Amino acid sequence: MRTVTIGESNPILGIKNTLDIRSIKNYHIPVKYSEEPFKVSLLTANDLYEIQQADVCFIFGTWGSTNFNRVWHPTNNIRRQAWVANINTFFTNILNSYNKKFIVFETGTLCRIRNAVSDVNGMSWKDSTPLYYRMGLNHWTYGKAKFCKPKTDRLEIYIKNNLEFSSVFKNQFNNHTWQNNKDGDIIICPGLENDPTATKPVEQFVEDSYTKIREHTDRNIFVKPHPGSLLDYSKYDEIDKKTPLKNLKERLYCAVLDNSTSIFELTFLGIPCFTSSANFGYKLKNNDLSKINDIYYADKYEMKQWYNEMAHTEFTFAEISTSHRTKTDILNYIIELIE
């Protein structure tokens, strides 16, 4: 197997370490962020040759957003996030032109359930260890990426890796309970504006969802914007975007999401979610808002299967960067994705 690693992010350097020590023929393109972009060399003739010869390449991060903060400009916007998106667009266009397979690392998925159980106010799932990275083939989102299929019970590994929350994780993974307020409210959680993975613009998603829900119920409906959103949803009953979802649990009947990764926290809290086909919760079968009064409650066996499947979408930095064969051999998972 021949590989190419692109960039200097932690997961890229981690997988590079694994490939090097395991004697996999790897070529590294050390593209590194700089506030002086004109001094950065992106591609040499030899880089291009190695990409052409590779069986799989590795990149980190997203691309395709038209959000101002994520559109790079050499003078108006040199934010790291925008720069990464621009570089990824450049390289994925090259990889796709050669019909190359590539592994995309991105921020975690299931680990976001830490938000549901942390006792620390303002603490993010990113603040807990171990650090997880999503790993998909050719993309990073549900419905577009290929993720690893469950081979073993990764939930047991997951519980051991998260000792701080092990008891509550074990209980909900093995005996999931739905804890919504049957007389409660409905929350619509739009994603960040201009998200390239959304099925429709967020304003349209909120309007369409609100209209459809109102056709079938007179329950209270409120909107909680994405924490990074700058949009005004004041024409709806709006909740402060910084309000933790766990603080809303007691009043919620269900949630409505497009591609939002809030699916993990809300589901772990026991709140059913109606989702689009772009959401990791799509398999939980609440996809039709005309059935808002007839929620499908997956049983504990279905839920354990879903949790285990989601645990196979992300890996710890230690698993990615391991230099020897362990219970989680990352190379076996990579081979599975590219075959």
Image (cartoon, rainbow, N blue to C red):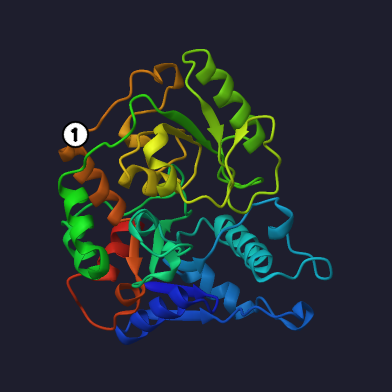
Q: Would residue 267 appear left or right of 51 to someone viewing this image?
A: left
Res 321 → quadrant: bottom left
Res 181 → quadrant: top left
Q: What kind of element bears circle 1?
A: loop
Q: Residue at x 47, y 68 (%)?
A: 58
Q: How crowded is the residue under tag 1: few (<14 C-alpha within 10 Å), some, or many (20+)?
A: few
Q: Residue at x 70, y 50 (%)?
A: 66
Q: Residue at x 38, y 83 (%)?
A: 17
Percent across and percent down for residue 313 are: 34, 56
Q: Which amino acid does label 1 sit on?
A: Asp
Q: Residue at x 57, y 44 (%)?
A: 191
User: Total marks drawn?
Assistant: 1
Q: Residue furthest top?
A: 215
Q: Can residue 339 be seen in this view?
A: no
User: In terms of depth relative to the viewer, which is nearer, 227 or 296?
Assistant: 227
Q: Split into 4 quadrants, where in the image is the N terminus?
A: bottom left
Q: Would residue 305 appear left or right of 228 to someone viewing this image?
A: left
Compared to residue 274, the image places residue 115 above or below, namely: below
Compared to residue 147, the image places residue 272 above or below, namely: above
Percent across and percent down for residue 155 are: 20, 57
Q: Can residue 286 be seen in this view?
A: yes
Compared to residue 142, the image places residue 180 above or below, namely: above
Per the image, the residue denoted by label 1 is 299
Percent across and percent down for residue 215 are: 52, 13
User: In terms of depth relative to the viewer, which is nearer, 102 or 266?
Assistant: 266
